[in-house]
Amino acid sequence: DADVTQTPRNRITKTGKRIMLECSQTKGHDRMYWYRQDPGLGLRLIYYSFDVKDINKGEISDGYSVSRQAQAKFSLSLESAIPNQTALYFCATSLGQGNTEAFFGQGTRLTVV
Amino acid sequence: EDKVVQSPLSLVVHEGDTVTLNCSYEVTNFRSLLWYKQEKKAPTFLFMLTSSGIEKKSGRLSSILDKKELFSILNITATQTGDSAVYLCAVDPARSGTYKYIFGTGTRLKVLA
């Protein structure tokens, strides 16, 4: 089983709908992140959380919200989806101390029509 | 504004060739630079570099960091078709109490048989 699991893996939704992307991890990491990836733009940070009481906006948080339900769970919501939110979304985790790499989930491909 | 720039954007080589991928960065402070390989979906970790001039090596892949000139290179020798992927560079820009990763747009490498 993957250490960082995202659900769903693929989703098509209509403009204006609310949608939630979920992420769970078994690595025991404190830090969790949501990124989106668009062609030619690389990975951009949406939100990040350093523990269940700590939520921070990334560079492109408008139109998104998050919830850190537990150390292992970090969900991303699009309250009213719009077509330019069509992208590949990644959840990532990292340790709470020191220099460390991020571990990524398999990604969720979201299409807003 | 912190930024990470990778070059070239894409590269096509033949099996057996040696390639060098470049990553330059501008960040307020610097903690570490990371290289990832992205084949289908999830980026997978390759190297973390924190000190100048110390080469990290894994098989045919190696990487080195120059903190004075603010860049890193990723070398792949004797390339194979399985090296075809997008290679991502990320920098952790060391702000107090935070660990965030700023990604470049990636270099797409295609290795022809």
Image (cartoon, coloured by chain):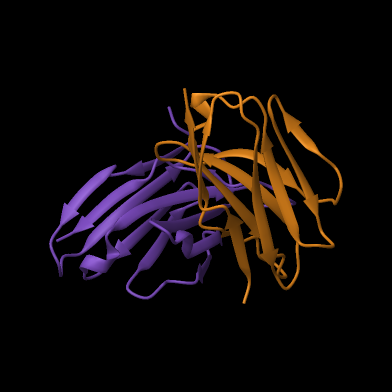
Q: Where is residue A105 shown, x and y percent of the image? A: 44, 42
Describe residue A41's horizontal placement relative to residue A102 as left or right.
left
Pick the front one: A59 or B39? B39
* Residue plotted at (39% across, 48% down): A23
Residue A100's x, y, as percent?
A: 68, 47
- Chain in purple in the render: A
Q: Is residue B101 visible?
A: no
Q: Which of B109 and A37 is in front in this view?
A: B109
Residue A27 in sight from this viewpoint: yes
Tell me the quarter of the picture where residue A2 sits.
top left
At a point 48% along the width and 46% down the height, the residue shown is: A72
Q: Left or right: B7 with respect to B94?
A: left
B28 or A79: nearer the eye? B28
Q: Where is residue A62 in the image (x, y as percent from the top left)?
A: 37, 76
Foreground residue among A75 and B53: B53
- Is A40 above or below relative to A71? below
Is residue B76 rendered to the left or right of residue A41? right
Q: In this view, does B21 lie above or below B46?
A: below
Hue used for the chain lettered B: orange
Q: Residue at x 65, y 60 (%)?
A: B99
Residue at 50% in and 49% down: A92
